[in-house]
Image (cartoon, rainbow, N blue to C red):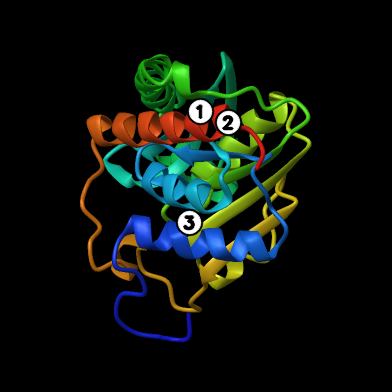
């Protein structure tokens, strides 16, 4: 983006629209599926999908926080069309096991899995078939990348032909590679990264009602376009 201080994005929708323009230049088209990671990734994905004219869906993810330090992820889990993805951050997970009984980490994962299943069921109507299709995975940014890696795992299990990770911001060392992604696109990749929210003027919480509204609006718009047929 060319700036090293201050917010780079007004909000998630603006960031998604900017990403959409970049993906159009990369040749991504309306035949792809755009999936937003629940919940903050959906406003980004909705704006991106609008630019492409692509189908929009939602993918449920949950971070696994270290007991007593929930902001530190030792891993993440994801769910899509009855399949489950999982990723453990190697060093953090090993360190957590040194500090906490394995049963405590298992309990964290069990609680996260219950919430994951609730989210996946709630948004099950917005989970397009991925088999043989190009998939664009969106979040509002990457920090550790744990939730995105869990999402990549479950998308691969659902038979995606290729997967592009598209995010507004990520640490510079994270954009070099991400296992399971054919391409990783980040609009802004600072060397000194603090938090995703620091790069937005408006980084308010995204609730489930807002997510459902965006998904329904995108589906209605695409159905309307499809009903008109080719020009």
Q: Earlier in the sequence, mark 1 or mark 3?
A: 3
Query: Which one is nearer the viewer's eye here, 12 or 72?
Result: 12
* Residue 74, image x, y percentages: 47, 42
Q: Is residue 88 above or below residue 177?
A: above
Residue highlighted by disc 2: 226
Q: CA distance from mark 2 to mark 3?
A: 33 Å
Q: Which mark is residue 142?
A: 3
Badge 2 vs badge 1, beta-carbon distance below 8 Å = yes
* Residue 13, image x, y percentages: 36, 55
Left or right placement of residue 190 versus residue 166 in this view = left
* Residue 187, image x, y percentages: 52, 69
Tag 1's secondary structure?
A: helix
Q: Is residue 11 above or below residue 156?
A: below
Q: Which mark is residue 223?
A: 1
Q: Residue at x 73, y 32 (%)?
A: 160
Classify mark 3: residues with Cα within 10 Å, few (<14), some (14-19) or many (20+): many
Is residue 169 visible in the rendered image? The answer is no
Among the 4 quarters of the image, the one containing residue 219: top left
Q: Residue at x 43, y 36 (%)?
A: 218
* Residue 48, image x, y percentages: 50, 52
Classify mark 2: residues with Cα within 10 Å, few (<14), some (14-19) or many (20+): few
Among the 4 quarters of the image, the one containing residue 12: bottom left
Q: Earlier in the sequence, mark 2 or mark 3?
A: 3
Tag 3's secondary structure?
A: loop
Query: Which one is nearer the viewer's eye here, 230 or 36?
Result: 230
């Amino acid at each position: 983006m060319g700036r090293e201080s201050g917010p780079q994005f007004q909000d998630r929708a603006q960031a998604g629209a900017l990403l959409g323009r970049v993906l159009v230049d990369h040749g991504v088209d309306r035949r792809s599926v755009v999936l937003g990671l629940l919940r903050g990734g959906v406003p980004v994905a909705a704006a991106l999908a609008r630019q492409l004219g692509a189908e929009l869906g939602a993918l449920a993810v949950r971070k696994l926080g270290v007991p007593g330090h929930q902001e530190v992820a030792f891993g993440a889990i994801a769910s899509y069309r009855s399949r489950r993805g999982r990723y453990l951050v190697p060093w953090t997970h090993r360190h957590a096991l040194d500090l906490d009984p394995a049963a405590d980490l298992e309990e964290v994962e069990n609680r996260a899995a219950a919430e994951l299943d609730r989210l996946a069921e709630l948004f099950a109507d917005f989970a397009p078939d991925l088999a043989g299709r190009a998939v664009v995975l969106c979040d509002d940014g990457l920090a550790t990348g744990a939730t995105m890696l869990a999402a990549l795992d479950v998308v691969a299990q659902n038979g995606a032909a290729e997967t592009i990770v598209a995010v507004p911001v990520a640490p510079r060392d994270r954009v070099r590679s991400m296992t399971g992604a054919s391409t990783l696109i980040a609009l802004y990749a600072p060397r000194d990264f603090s938090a995703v929210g620091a790069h937005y003027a408006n980084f308010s919480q995204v609730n489930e009602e807002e997510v459902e509204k965006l998904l329904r609006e995108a589906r209605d718009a695409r159905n309307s376009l499809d009903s008109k047929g080719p020009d």
